[in-house]
Amino acid sequence: MILYLLLVVVGFACLIYGANWLVDGASALAKKHKMSDLAIGLTIVAFGTSAPELVVNVVASVNGYSDLILGNIIGSNNFNTFIILGLSGIIMPIAVQSSTARKEIPISLFVAVLLLFFLNDFDFSGPGLLSRWEAAVLLVLFLLFMYYVFNQMKRDSTLHTDVLVKSNVKIWGLILIGLSGLIVGGQLVVMNSVSIASTLGVSEKIIGL
């Protein structure tokens, strides 16, 4: 049990450092190609912060741990909304742009409600299954959202700031090491979390939450 916990901690460390290195490398590559700060924030940094969850969920999906996937998604969203947003608001009031309040937040709510209906077959009588076509709809909606994001970036007039450009070797080294850390960390977290759940006799969903 203690070994499983230690390996989970090591896995999370690999995920965190791997995501940071991946973001550093990808951001440096984007800067080298004159990509704006806003574009980097909305794409590369956004992906980097979600990369650990993505890797964990992909590993869990490949191994058939569906409860762990949903538990991780729900737990992560709740933590981001209640804890991170709550603590940030207590430390300093958060200024929200009108476009965020009128567009981005409603989009997030719409996707959450849509997922609720998908998992309950719209009439709340189904077995609680996310089918392949429903998953495909979610991916298409994500692509549409990215299209919206890139359109927003085109309207942004923020100029690119000059920074010290890293060498290609260092950039790709960070990217490859970051990806490796994510893969190794994802495997460690999923496999040992499942082992902990089995040892404690609890559902994988509880561990994910």
Image (cartoon, helix red, strand yellow):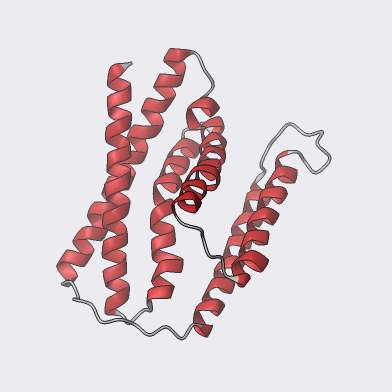
Relative vertical location of residue 141 with respect to residue 202 in this rendering, above or below: below
Residue drawn at (28%, 72%), measured in percent from left and top?
29
Residue drawn at (26%, 70%), measured in percent from left and top?
28
Which quadrant of the view contains residue 74? top right
User: Quadrant of the image for the N terminus?
Assistant: top left
Relative vertical location of residue 63 with respect to residue 172 in this rendering, above or below: above
Which quadrant of the view contains residue 174? bottom left
The x and y percentages for residue 203 are 54, 21
Is residue 64 visible in this depiction of the protein?
no
Relative vertical location of residue 122 with respect to residue 158 in this rendering, above or below: above
Front in this rendered view, residue 201 or 83: 83
Residue drawn at (18%, 72%), measured in percent from left and top?
166
Front in this rendered view, residue 103 or 34: 103
Is residue 42 visible in this depiction of the protein?
yes
Front in this rendered view, residue 78 or 175: 78
- The mark total stands at 0
The x and y percentages for residue 148 are 59, 73
Q: Seen in the image, is 87 located left or right of residue 70?
A: left
The x and y percentages for residue 49 are 40, 54
Q: Seen in the image, is 79 located left or right of residue 48?
A: right
Which quadrant of the view contains residue 106? bottom right
Q: Seen in the image, is 12 located left or right of residue 194?
A: left
The x and y percentages for residue 51 are 40, 51
Residue drawn at (38%, 85%), measured in percent from left and top?
159
